[in-house]
Image (cartoon, grey):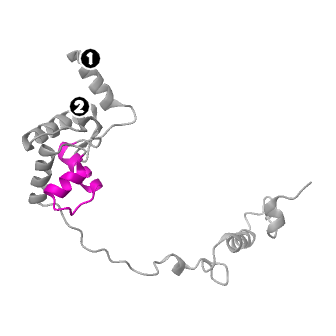
Amino acid sequence: MAASLAERDSPVIPQPPPGSWGMPEDRDNYIVQMRRRYSPAGMLNADGSINQDFFKPRRVVLVADRAKWGDAEREGLFKGLEVHGVGKWREINRDYLKGQWDDQQVRIRAARLLGSQSLVRYMGWKGSKAKVDAEYAKNKAIGEATGCWKAGQLVEDDHGSVRKYFEAQQATSGEH
């Protein structure tokens, strides 16, 4: 019978005989042997115990203070949604937010304003602050009715509750 690749390339670590796991020295010996075989360099002390310093960060990285969204940025985003619409994050950022945010940050903030994690149904939608606030209230009502209102946003669940809600609304209103 041919030896497996692992058997050919590495020494065999004897396993304790069945029933001897109750003997601490056999079990501990086996654990130390396994650690020595599979642990990266520097992770173990000479006796086979784990070197806790291995897991400590080697250097501390300080992150610069990030800019925060204030009233001016919020109003700029409202204006950008009114002029450019949902999905035009780069244009909104350039024209109303002084280019200080990336597209993803603007999208996330817009989703929070609209109260909907998914913006798919809003792509291209434009609206004033009053319309954005109305959408937020509508999404909150839907989320509370379906149990899908999480952290201030309408979030789809695994059962498709939000999708089913919209399908039921379309069926009763006759929209296609």
Say what amino acid the circle numbered 1 marks: Ala
Q: Secondary structure at mark 1?
A: helix
Amino acid bearing label 2: Ala
Residue 83: x and y, percent?
Answer: 12, 45
The label shown at residue 96 is: none
Residue that numbered label 1 is attached to: 171
Task: Tell me if 141 is positioned left or right of 148 in this view.
Answer: left
Residue 5 versus residue 109 in the image, above or below: below
Residue 145's tag is 2
Per the picture, the main secondary structure of the magenta-coloured stretch is: helix
What residue appears at the point 20 percent right and 56 percent down from the top-left corner? 93
Q: Is residue 44 above or below residue 144?
A: below
Distance Cα–Cα, label 2 vs label 1: 18 Å
Q: Residue at x 27, y 19 (%)?
A: 176
Q: Is residue 174 above or below residue 22?
A: above
Q: Nearer the viewer, residue 81 or 3?
A: 81
Report the span colored magenta.
88-115
Q: Residue at x 27, y 59 (%)?
A: 102
Q: Residue at x 67, y 82 (%)?
A: 47
Q: Position of residue 25 (x, y in %)?
A: 73, 73
* Residue 125, percent from left and from top: 19, 37
Q: Secondary structure at mark 2?
A: helix
Density class for disc 2 (Cα within 10 Å; few <14, some 14-19, many ≥20) is few
